[in-house]
Amino acid sequence: MENSNEKEPKKLSPKMYRIRDWFDEKITAKRLIPVLVVLLVVYLLNLTWPVWNTAYVLLMRILKPFIIGFGIAYILRPVTLFFEKYKIKPAISVPLTLLGFIFILVLLFSSIIPTLYEDISVLFSTSVDGVQKLFREYQMWNNGTSEPWVTDIFNQVINVLKGLIDSIPSLPALVSQFVGQFFSILTTALFSFIIGMYFIFDYERVTRGVVNMAHKVSPRLSASIIVINRAVLGYLRTLIFIMTITCVEYGLIYTLVGHPYALVLGVLTALGLLIPYIGPTVVHVFGVLTALTLPMPRVITLTIALMVMSQVDGYLISPMVYSKRDKVDPISSLFVFFAGSVLFGFVGILLSMPTYFAIRAVRDLKRNNWQL
């Protein structure tokens, strides 16, 4: 006879039954083994990282000209397609395109970029003067005194700005670093341009070969490469167009209020689009701070104009320029941006948005059952 005092097993609630069934269905040995294998590989890589890191550095030195060359071909491909529409032979269009590209680079690095660099350095110094003027205005409004917490904030902002100014190397220092690495940079550049020229000539054959090899590995891989190419090209075309609009409109606004660094701020606002949502806002703040040396009516006019144009860009121009597939999710894009900047620095910042669109394109392809 069973003991009447023995407790019966407690019954689970329907919700707990569903959770148990989900674990029984999803957490299987077939799914756990690949995860364990990946963790084991990561662990072994961590143990032998000095060896792999040396091999990685050597491999990147070898592949660097090929990567840069393919990047040049990828960027200049739309230009060569434009020439092909007018039945201009590649033997003529490709050298013309590369010569134009080299001319633009020489122009940028010989005159435009040094001027912008000096102006940006002065811009940071002017922002310090603007913050100090703003603090003095606050003290006058507060009967010549300031709250301790306001003084602390002011000192922190000044220290941050001065730290930024000190971290920017002078142009002669940059030139000396460039001269020290001149032959290495020149060799890489020459090889990259030569390889890029061959890539442009054989672009169709190379890309077709890559897609065919990927298809042999997996049809899903080849489909992923195709949608990534479409997404990144669409993003780059849209970005260049809207950056041009942004540079012109904000450069014009700063010019109309008499800002001494109107061109620099217009260019920086356009480049700020590489950092979604945050970049242009930071440039606007610097624009207002550096404008505080101007008469107050102009500062107020500039502030209102920037607020109005930000709304116009967000609700009128961007929806007209960006297609539905080019719209950016704030949280996901910012996560990719910060991850790229932490892992790969400046290069990660440049590649963060193309990476975001590539990941999203593959996700949408998967949702469509890998059908193009």
Image: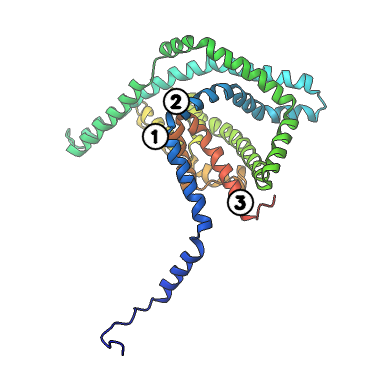
Residue 85 percent coordinates (x, y) = 79, 30
271 on left or right of 95? left
Tell me the number on the disc at residue 364.
3
Q: Are marks 3 and 2 in contact (CB under 8 Å)?
A: no
363 on left or right of 91? left
Q: CA distance from mark 3 to mark 2?
A: 47 Å
Q: Amino acid at mark 2?
A: Gly
Q: Which residue is mark 2?
A: 258
Q: Which residue is mark 1?
A: 285
Query: In this rendering, is residue 8 above or below 119?
Result: below
Q: What colouring does the structure picture have?
A: rainbow
Which element is circle 3 on?
helix
Residue 297 percent coordinates (x, y) = 38, 33
197 on left or right of 92? left
Residue 93 percent coordinates (x, y) = 76, 22
Q: Amino acid at mark 1?
A: Val
Residue 266 can be seen in this image: yes
How many dots with numbers?
3
Q: Residue furthest front?
A: 1
